[in-house]
Amino acid sequence: MNPDPRYREVQRFRQRWLWALLGGITLLTIVLGPTSPVGLAIVGAVAAFLFGLRLETEVRADGIYLKMWPLHLSFRRIPWSEIERYESRTYSPLREFGGWGIRWAPGKIAYNVSGNRGVWIQRSNDRSVLVGSQHAEDLVEAIEEVYES
């Protein structure tokens, strides 16, 4: 087995609105009264956690690998034998999954960081997976290249 991925994408939480919100909370904490070191520490910890979060997606010879670091210390694998079909699609993170991150809904799970594009993977165990991607067409192309060879 060759562990080198045929496709690799790393996404991070770098949305301006998110950082503006955290900055606004910090500013309000400082302006509205005695600054609580505990409050600032909590905001700082949340900011550091979000800054470090990253979604890693890889297409390898034996399946699709996903890792949301630091929540997952190792990759989660979707073996080719479990995949019935897949497609690139546009979705609504808020409407369909309630937001970004690792999100569960009945019969499906989403790994997404930003945007509204991804690859929908229908699995044989009736648990679908949506993988958010900034390059969904490239991801589908890599899956086709490896899966159908």
Image: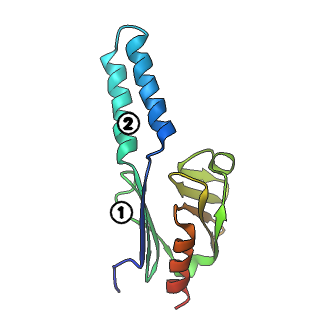
Q: Position of residue 46 (x, y in %)?
A: 39, 35
Which residue ends up furthest to the top in the rendered image? 33
Chain-order first, disc 2 or disc 1: 2
Q: Note whether 93 is above or below 49 in the view shown.
A: below
- Residue 83 against residue 42 in the figure, above or below: below
Across and down, in percent, residue 79 comes to 50, 77
Label pair 2/1, CB-CB below 8 angstroms: no
Task: Give the spatial CA distance, label 2 vs label 1.
Answer: 23 Å
Q: Residues within 10 Å of mark 2 (few under 14, many from 20)?
A: some
Q: Nearer the viewer, residue 31 or 96?
A: 31
Q: How many marks?
A: 2
Task: Determine the image quadrant of residue 144.
Answer: bottom right
The label shown at residue 47 is 2
Q: Relative to residue 102, is residue 50 drawn left or right?
A: left
Q: Amino acid at mark 2?
A: Ala
Mark 2 element type: helix
Q: Residue at x 69, y 47 (%)?
A: 95
Are there few (<14), some (14-19), or many (20+) residues within 10 Å of tag 1? few
Query: Regarding mark 1 in the picture, which secondary structure is present there?
Result: loop
Colour pattern? rainbow
Residue at 49 percent across and 85 percent down: it is 146
User: Based on the displayed image, in which of its 4 quarters is residue 86 positioned?
Assistant: bottom right
Residue flagged by tag 1: what amino acid is it? Ser
Q: Position of residue 8 (x, y in %)?
A: 41, 70
Q: Residue at x 39, y 49 (%)?
A: 53
**Residue 23 placement (x, y as % from top left):** 42, 28
* Residue 74: image tag: 1
As rendered, which of 90 and 128 lies closer to the eye?
90
Q: Residue at x 36, y 63 (%)?
A: 74
Q: Locate the N terminus by quadrant.
A: bottom left
Task: Indicate which label's residue lies in the foreground, 2 or 1.
Answer: 2
Q: Is residue 4 left or right of residue 7?
A: left
